[in-house]
Image: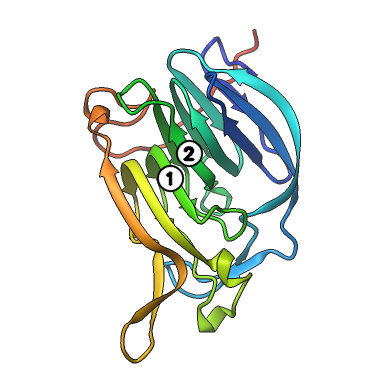
Amino acid sequence: TKDNGIGLYLNQSPHGYHLKFQTNGSVDIYRITHLNNPPEKGRPLTGGCITEANSFSAEEFQENYVLDSNDIIFVEDKVWIDGAVRGKATVVAAKLPDVSADRKDIVLNGNIVYTVKDGTDVLGLIAQRNILFPLYNLPQDIEIDAALLASKGNISRYCYACNSCGTEGAAADRIKNSLFLYGSLIANTDSDFEFAWVQWNGHSYDVISGFQNVSNQYDSYLFYNPPPYFPEAGDYQFISWDEVAN
């Protein structure tokens, strides 16, 4: 639904949505039909163990949405994102009103890359809770070009090999080679910007889950050219989203 000519609204669905950005300035929108089963068990930064499906196994194409010059996509559900970004857009994943148990996440489902890095392409990702990397379907080398904001949570990848939670997936799923982040990272709670869980082997630390090599580069164009409707100062709070019939 296009709301009053501004932005795209996607309502809550059983499992969430997958947004795949295209080099022609559009987004392919899929509805998730099946999550990974059984769901993965991992250790979050807050400790303990959590059983949560952050990977999906099936989806249905909904539409191809052509971005406006400064666009916003509001998803009232969990959303997986990847693709090649052309233009300027912000994606928000949030369920309103804001209730702790219903807060929504963004999952970085694979490479998210700008067609050019000269300020022309800008993507903002705002999650009501966490911004996460999944266990499955990630390439060994991944690049994320975006301004990331976890409003009430953190930016991280769960530990999928911590003793207290057991081991999930194959080693090639748990341990990835490299991660390059181009943009900015903003989180409400402690985040792991190394995106690696390590274990002492008696001589050195081995990565047991996450990325072996991580590099970050701030996108200086964000200073004068932030993503559409992206907070530039103060605290960010979700207040309301009004849907207006055309």
Residue at 31% across, 53% down? 215
The numbered mark at residue 182 is none
Residue type at tag 2: Ile
Q: How is the image coloured?
A: rainbow
Q: Residue 3 sits in which quadrant?
A: top right
**As drawn, which residue projects farthest toward the bottom?**
202
**As drawn, which residue projects farthest toward the top?**
246
- Measure the C-alpha gap from mark 1 to mark 2: 6 Å
**Residue 79: in sight, yes or no?**
yes
Q: Is residue 33 above or below residue 241?
A: below
Q: Residue 245 sits in which quadrant?
A: top right
**Residue 96: in sight, yes or no?**
no
Mark 1, secondary structure of its residue? strand
- Discs 1, 2 touching: Cβ within 8 Å: yes
User: At which x and y percent is residue 121?
Assistant: 39, 24
User: At which x and y percent is residue 177?
Assistant: 45, 61
Quadrant containing the C terminus is top right
Residue at 30% across, 24% down? 118
Q: Is residue 70 above or below residue 167?
A: above
User: At which x and y percent is residue 45?
Assistant: 42, 67
User: At which x and y percent is residue 208?
Assistant: 46, 75
Q: Is residue 151 above or below residue 89?
A: below
Mark 2, secondary structure of its residue? strand
Taking depth in this image into account, of 72 and 18 the one nearest to the observer is: 18
Taking depth in this image into account, of 202 and 77 the one nearest to the observer is: 202
Residue at 70% across, 23% down? 63
Q: Residue 95 sits in which quadrant?
A: top right
Find disc 2 in the rendering and name its residue.
112
Find disc 1 in the rendering and name its residue.
143
